[in-house]
Amino acid sequence: MSRIVGIDLGTTNSLVAVVDWKTGLPRVVPDRGGRVLLPSIVAFTPDGVLVGDAARRQLVRRPETTVYSVKRLMGRGYEDVRDELCYFPYKVLPCEGIVKIDLGGREVTPPEISAIILKSLRDRAEAYLGEPVEKAVVTVPAYFNDSQRQATKDAGRIAGLDVVRIVNEPTAASLAYGLGRLKEGVVAVYDLGGGTFDISILRVKDGVFEVLATNGNTRLGGDDFDRAIVVWLLDDIRERYGAYLGRDAEAMQELRLAAEAAKIRLSTEERTTLTIPFDAFTYHREITRADLEGLVERLVDSTLGPCRMALADAGLAPADVDEVVLVGGSTRVPLVRRRVQELFDRAPHSQLNPDEVVAVGAAVQAHILEGGITDMLLLDVTPLSLGIETLGGIVSVLIPRNTTIPTSAREMFTTSVDGQTLVDMHVVQGERELVRDCRSLARFELRGIDPMPAGLPKIEVVFLIDANGILQVTARELRTGREAAIEVRPTYGLSDADVDRMVEDSFVYAEADVEARLLIETRNEADTVVTHVERALRQGGGLVAADEREAIGVALEVLRQIRGGTDRDLIHERTAALNRATEHLAEVMMDAALKGALESRRATEIAASPGES
Ligand code: AMP
């Protein structure tokens, strides 16, 4: 079996790593010069295409044809990136839903650029392993959507690599620290690189990683630290030598490089000296760690808000976090570590090189897929889609067929009847649109929901398939906290022939199924409107004139009569007609509600005032 490598395809740098079969230890693969970081830069020159450090040297000479930060463009449309185009010196054009990069006559897509980077890493891995490499696990940010993930897979294909798995970067970093072995826990992954900041909150349970929340800033990183130092140096030079170098591109480049080097030294030293030979004078300046911290403190502190927001989105407090993982070169800055430790009140994992930890995790995942690690995660795919029955006997799929397990998915549902206190949960498996054509896996009830109007309860359904293929379904009503759960083994009693037949049927009946689903959805929509209008008439009917009430009553009755038929357009039309007939009633009710709210507010204000005067 051919090896599977782990690749961190980064915005600034990319790396490839493999796990040694004999020792089981991961190793980041160096190039011939011993460097492990490959700058994610591709330069198109008259002499050919350059990648990495060689391409970086073209940044100043050929800004229009040297492409960096292409990850920011992957799988995105022109409208998505329009606001960011000012950051790219190369030309980006819209092209059928995606973007292309115009290299002066030649147009290339972001996956093609990424493929050049991947190909370079593939060559590196082949030279190191002494065998062809055709498969890879590639990491992406947790917030990447489907098209961004697909674009990453496309890049692999163009580079001759089968991307056997896309892994979230924070999950990879957690795997590198062995956190996949945790029975249960919450992991915060704080990732501060050169140009981006990401915070991810993950829940790990029995080897399954679930991304609970992500936040961050796509324009914040170590480069901003460097800029803050440069501004400080420019002021100092002006004061001491009377020269302003801010408009001298070459001097600025020198200053930036010196600032970054000083910043890096200050991660381990208390003070350091910068020496920059300019034409007119040689500049010397001592800078202490305290100076640096004064310059970057505001930037570092600005990462804490997104951390708190991610925690809030996950419904957690800092104390709920069990493990903190640091990723990205800028987490070597001592002030960053201190702030992260203060926020979560625990020492973060930092033993591994923060530049390499994602690639190492990708290699661990790759090794699991190769069968090299058997005690961690058993990876497989779901042979058939898994979902639950919703109103009218339609299947709502939570985990599509062929999803790699372990996996999890969550979705919100609500009730369809006023005062409903019980929900029947029906877990089904199959590729057809209607429940009656799928395999029934399990049923259970969620009871004890407070009686509320239809549509108000929030029922969160979570599907979790663990490494052993066991599906756990949990339903929780968020207002009352009522919860019910069930466990099933979806593949139990299912032969390969069954799976084939069920997949085949879904193709044969595709059209009829979609038609049936649409009809049910249209009826559901009609029923929802009928329920709402009935409620509105009960509560606010007296606010409008009798003839208006009567007109609404007629439209309501017509819809009730025809909703059971099969003419989808007619049901749709009558639903719209009922909606139109009640527009005025809705307005009047809204005004009355608003007035009521204002009056009660005035009442509270009046009640509060005597004590204040
Ligand atoms: P990454 O995007 O993860 O490769 O991180 C690159 C950023 O980390 C750059 O801004 C580097 O200047 C910064 N960096 C790398 N090493 C160190 C270090 N020892 N101390 C401070 N910053 C560092």
Image (cartoon, helix red, strand yellow):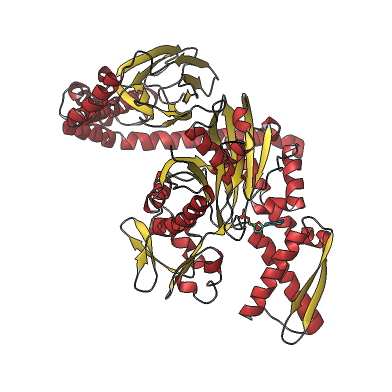
| Left or right relative to 335: residue 381 | left
Ligand 1 image-quadrant field = bottom right
Taking the view exactly as shown, the residue that stands out farthest to the front is: 130
Of residues 182 and 188, the one drawn nearer to the viewer in this rendering: 182
Of residues 34 and 219, the one drawn nearer to the viewer in this rendering: 34
| Left or right relative to 299: residue 592 | left
| Left or right relative to 508: residue 445 | right
Q: Position of residue 23 (x, y in %)?
A: 62, 36
Taking the view exactly as shown, the residue that stands out farthest to the bottom is: 280
In which quadrant is the N terminus drawn?
Answer: top left
Q: Position of residue 109 (x, y in %)?
A: 38, 60
Residue 548 occupies quadrant? top left
Q: Please, is residue 522 above or below residue 232 in the view?
A: above
| Left or right relative to 463: residue 270 | right
In which quadrant is the C terminus drawn?
Answer: top right
Of residues 317 and 433, the one drawn nearer to the viewer in this rendering: 433
From where the camera sits, is residue 140 visible? no
At x 70% / y 40%, what residue is drawn? 349
At x 75% / y 65%, what residue is drawn? 262
From where the camera sits, is residue 67 visible? yes
At x 49% / y 75%, what residue is drawn? 62
